[in-house]
Image (tube, grey):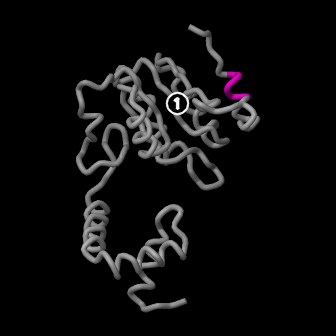
Amino acid sequence: MRISPLIDRLIESLQALPGVGPKTATRTALHLLQYNRPGAVALASALTEAAENVQRCRTCRTLTESEQCAICANPRRDGHLLCVVESPSDIVAIELAGGFSGRYYVLHGRLSPIDGIGPDELGLIDLPTRVRDGGVREVILATNPTVEGEATAHFIKESLRDTGATVTRIAHGVPLGGELEYIDGGTIVHALRGRRTVE
């Protein structure tokens, strides 16, 4: 159903957000216009400013408005430990969990020849140099446990073979508090393969 040209355009634009379909976009647009116009103006301004000023960090490739992100610029981070992730949202998840004090390298995707995404698009050609020149001792591969994520991790492991760095893979398995009878078979297999000695 068409409402008006401007509202229709707003609804279509809101559908660019992940998980937002026509109904959610319509509700959001009408809510902003009916009840929260100052919020709509602030949202539009923030989106415009971010779209114009956010770029990739020259060191780790995450999103930032400066030449180097806060993590790369922080001298207290362990430069010998590098975690390779698929997206900036993975950094957010790891940082919120706590316990990791190293640095990151963001791929902005995973290898997918069908979609035309190869090593060049993911910055994988520059990764061995970053590892060698940065004195990295361990590279943690934190790509997602999908077919493409596993293929990407394998490619990275092979490309880093001559750098002298240890290459490790994050464990995949049963979540804390999970019950085995409700876990899928693939996850159980990963958990069994990734078992370690009880301390």
Q: How many marks?
A: 1
- Picture quadrant where residue 74 is located: top left
Query: Which is more toward the observer, 131 or 179?
Result: 179
Q: Residue at x 72, y 38 (%)?
A: 182
Instruction: Residue at 61%, 48% (x, y): give it.
Output: 112
Q: Nearer the viewer, residue 181 or 168?
A: 181
| Residue identified by numbered label 1 | 141
Which range is magenta? 189-193
Prevailing secondary structure of the magenta residues: helix
Give x and y (percent) for residue 195.
Answer: 65, 18
Image quarter (top left, top right, bottom left or bottom right) of the C terminus: top right
Q: Position of residue 96 (x, y in %)?
A: 39, 37
Element on which disc 1 rests: strand
In the displayed structure, 118 sits above or below 25; it is above
Q: Looking at the picture, does residue 74 appear above or below residue 81?
A: below
Give above or below for 87 relative to 156: below
* Amino acid at circle 1: Leu
- Would you identify the image quadrant in which residue 39 lies? bottom left
Q: Residue 163: x percent and y percent?
A: 47, 20
Residue 191 among those drawn in magenta:
yes
Q: Is residue 38 magenta?
A: no
Q: Residue at x 71, y 36 (%)?
A: 183
The crowding category of the residue bearing disc 1, from other C-alpha atoms within 10 Å (few below 14, some 14 to 19, many at least 20), is many
The image shows residue 5, relative to residue 125, as above or below, that is: below
Which residue is depicted at the point 52% across and 47% down? 109
